[in-house]
Amino acid sequence: MRRLVAPLGRHVAFYIIMILSIVPTLAQISLQGVVLDAVSVRPIVGASIKCMEHPEGTSTNNQGTFYIKLDSSVVEIEISALGYQNQKVRLAGADRPLIVYLEKQEQFIETVDIVKKGRYKNRNPATELIDLVIQHKSQNRLTRKDSLYFQQYDKIKFGMVDPKPGFKNRLGDMSFFFKDVDTTSLRGHELLTLFLQEDVSDNYVRQRPTQQKKIIRSQSKTEFDSRYVNNPNISSYLNYLFQPVDIYDESIFFLNKLFLSPIADNAKMYYKYFVTDTLRTEKELFVRLRFAPRNSNDLLFHGQLVVSLDGRYAVKNVELNIDKKTNISWVNEFKISLSYFKNSEGVMLQDTSNVFVLFGRGKVDALFGQRSSVQHKYDTHSAIGDSIFSGAPIEMRLTKDQKIGDMRPVPLNPNEQRTYANIDSLNDLRSFKSLLAVGYLLAQGYFPVGKIELGPLEYLYHMNEMEGQRLRLGGRTTSGLSEKMYLEGYLAYGFRDERFKYYLRTAVALNGKSIATFPAHYLEASSQYDIFEPGKAIGYLKGDSFFRSFVSNKPTKWLETNAYKLGHVYEFGNHFSVETSFTHQRRHAIGDLRFSLTADSTQSLSQINTNDMQVVLRWAPFEKFYYRNLQRRTIVESYPVFNLQYNRGIKGFLGAGYDYDALRFSISKRFFMNQVGFGDVTMSAGKIWGVLPYPLLEMPNINEVKDRHTISYDMTNSMEFVADQFLKVAYDHELNGYILNKIPLIKRLRFREIFGVRMFYGKLSEDNNPYTSDKVVYFDKHQKGYTMTHVLQKQPYWEGYVGLDNILSILRVQYYYRFNYREHPNISNERFKLSLNFDF
C-alpha cells in the first residue's frame, strides 16, 4: 500500500525539522525530502529519486534525505530502493517538503550460502557470477562512452575523534570550539570537524582522444591563519588521500596504496566469494555476494556486492572494508560505500560514494576523514567541444552569484553548518595564533615574524672543516606580503675563515597570479656567494644543515663560488612547461682542492668561470602538488614526468673561459603493482660536448634529497666518478609486506620489504681525460696521496639495498651494499642505516 502521509511519531519529527530548515531557491523547483521504511520508520540509504520527464536524478544520503532541483515542467518522480516497491509521486507544487514511505518488496531467496568452517571451493555459484561481472565490466563502465558529462558535489571532512574532556573546559577562550561535537554520525563517538571543503563541479570526459576536464563552479572551505597553516596543502593532501572511487577500476587507490578491486580481472586469485541471497522485484533480479580476502594481511577488502541479473551483470551497490589485520599503519577503520543507478539505456551510473576512515593506534581513534560525493545530471549523448578541454585539467571558475548553498544536492547537518563560523571565531583568538606559531616552528622549522618567516631552524648552526662553526640567519616572505612576488635569502658567517656568505632570490609573477599556483608564469633572479662541495648546485638549501655536521668522511675540498642567475618559467595548462635561465658563476678552489694543469703540473688553474644558458622542457601530465607557503612539491602518482634539458656555455663574456654544449634527458614513473606494492623508476642520460675541467662534467649526486628526477648514490664518495656522457638508472620498490604477510607469527609484526638499486655508467672522452689530454686539469688527490676521482671502466657502477619498513610503525632499517669498484681507497662497501619513516 502506498502512503505519502502518515502520523508523525517521534522518529519522524527530526526529519521534518531538518527538511523545513533548508532555505530553498526560487529559480527552480527545489524538492527536498526523506525516504523511510514504512514499517520501521528508519531512513533508507541509497534510494534513487528519478524524474519521469527529464534525466535529473539523485539518491538519499546516510540519513535518508535528498535534495534536488527540478525543471518547472516536472510533475512526477519515481522513488526506488533495493528490496522495496518502486513508488511514483506526483508533485503538488514547488518547494514542498516530501516524506515518502516505501513498502518492502515481495521477495524470495533463490540461493542461500551458509558459510561453514570448511575448505573453500574455488568453483562455486558465487565465482561463476563474478566471472560474468568481470566479463561485462567494459560494457558497464562509463569510459565506454565517447562523450560524458555529469555534475559532481564533493564534501571532504577531517577532524578529531573523541576530543579529550579537558579540551572543553581547560583551554580558556578556545574551549567553546571543542564543545560543538557531532554525536550522531559515528555511533558511540564524538566527531569534531577541523576542516570542511565543498566543491560543485562540471565534469567532462571524452574518449577519442582521451581527455578529462573538471571545472569547479562553486567552492566553500574552512581556512586557518595562512601564516601558520598551509590551507591549500591541506586541501591538496586530503584530495590526494580521498580520491574518487569506482568499483570498475582494477584497483582502488588509498593512502598511497592500491587495494585490489573485488571485480578486478585477477580478483579470484585473492578473494573468496559467497552468495548471500537473491532478491527478486517486479522488474529486476539482484544477487547479493559477500567477499573476503584469502589472506587478511594483504591489501584487500571484505564486504558485499549487489549485482543485477538482467544480462548486464552490473554492480548496483558495494560496501568495502579493510580487515584489522591488513598491513596498514595508523588506520583503525576504513569503509567505502558506492551506489549506482540505471539510466534509460540500462547502464549503471554512479550516483553516490562515501569514503570514511578512522586514524589511530591500536584501540585509540584519534582522527577521522571522510569524502562524500554525489554525481547527477548525467549526459551521455551530447558532443563536447574542443574548447572545453583547453587549459588545465582542473580549473576554478567560481561565479560570485552562485553560492555553494544553492547548489548542494544534499544539505549539511547542523554541526557541519556551524563548522565554518566556529573556525572563523577560533582564528580571531590570540591564544590560538600563539599555539599555531609554536606548532609551525616545530613542524616546519620556520618562525613567522609579521609577513615574513625566519628559518629553517636546522640550518641555524653548522660545522665543517673549512668554516669551523657556521651561523646562518635565513628567511622568506609569505603570501601575507604578496602572492605575486617572493623573496628568500640568508646571511651566514664562518668563524674559522672569518667570512660572510649570502644568498638572495626573488620571483615576480607575470600573469597576475600567485607564483606557486598552477599554471605559473614568473621571472626570477638570484645572487649567491658561498662555499660548496664540488658538484653541488647553487640554491637556498645546499646541504649545510645541523645534522650534516656529524657525517663521517667530512669534505676538505671546496669551491668558493660567486653565482648570479636570471630565469623565466612559463607553464601551460596541459602541464607542459618551458624554463629558461642564464647563470654566471666564478669558482675558486679553496681548502686542499687543487686544479693542476695537465700541460704543466707545476701550474694550477686559479678560477673556473662560466656563463651557462639553459632551456628545460618539462611535461608532467595530470600533475598535482603539495603547497607550503609560496612553494610547492609534486605529489607522486602513477603518471610519468619527462625532462629535456639543454645547456650552452658562452666563452669570453664576463670573463668566462669555456664553450660547451650539454643535453640531458630524464624520465621517472611510479608503477603500482597491486598486491606486490609499487616501484619507482628514474632514468637519466646525457652528453656534454667541449673541453672542460672535470668539476664541470657529470658526477653522481651524493646523499641528495631525492625527488622524481634526482638519483642519489649512498655508497660513493664525493667526486669519485666523472663522465662527459652518461646513463643513470634508479629503481626503488616497496612490497608492502607481500612476502612477510604470509609467514606465521612474523606477519603480526606488519613489517614491509623494501629494496632498490642504483647504476651509473659513463665515458670520458680523450679530450677531457687528464691521462690523455694536455688541455684540462689533473684529478685532485687526497691528503694521503691517492687520487680521489676515477674514470669508469667497461662495467657500470652498481649499488643496492634491502631493508625493512614499518618497524614499530615509525622506523626503517636498510642494508646498503656496493657491488663493484670496491678496490677504490677510503670507501665503505657496506653499511646499515636506521631512519624515521612515517607511512600508512
Image: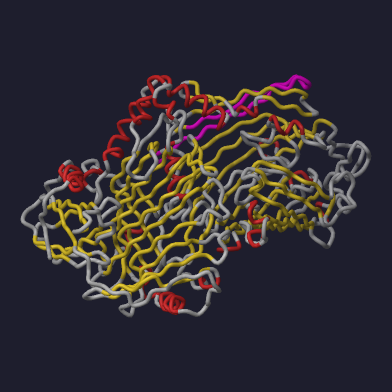
Q: Is residue 357 magenta?
A: no
Q: Is residue 108 left or right of residue 255?
A: left
| The one of 559 and 322 positioned closer to us in this rendering | 322
Q: Does residue 665 appear in this view?
A: no
Q: Does residue 317 appear in this view?
A: yes
Q: Position of residue 443 (x, y in %)?
A: 55, 32
Q: Residue furthest left?
A: 92
Q: Residue at x 44, y 26 (%)?
A: 166
| The one of 817 and 301 positioned closer to us in this rendering | 301
In the displayed structure, would residue 588 be above or below residue 317?
Answer: above
Q: Which colour scheme is used?
A: secondary structure
Q: Is residue 674 left or right of residue 463?
A: left
| The one of 769 and 625 positioned closer to us in this rendering | 625
Q: In this view, does 800 lie to the left or right of 794?
A: left
| Image: magenta residue range | 486-513
- Which quadrant holds the N terminus? bottom left
Q: Which residue is drawn at 24% across and 54% down?
A: 42
| The one of 343 and 270 positioned closer to us in this rendering | 270
Q: Where is residue 282 in the image (x, y as percent from the top left)?
A: 21, 75
Q: Position of residue 801 (x, y in %)?
A: 74, 54
Quarter of the image holding residue 669?
Answer: bottom right
Q: Does the magenta stretch include residue 501?
A: yes
Q: Position of residue 414 (x, y in %)?
A: 26, 39
Q: Which residue is drawn at 33% across and 74% down?
A: 278
Quarter of the image holding residue 488?
Answer: top right
- Magenta span main SS: strand
In the displayed structure, would residue 285 be above or below residue 222?
Answer: below
Quarter of the image holding residue 369?
Answer: top left
The count of marks equals 0
Q: Is residue 325 left or right of residue 499?
A: left
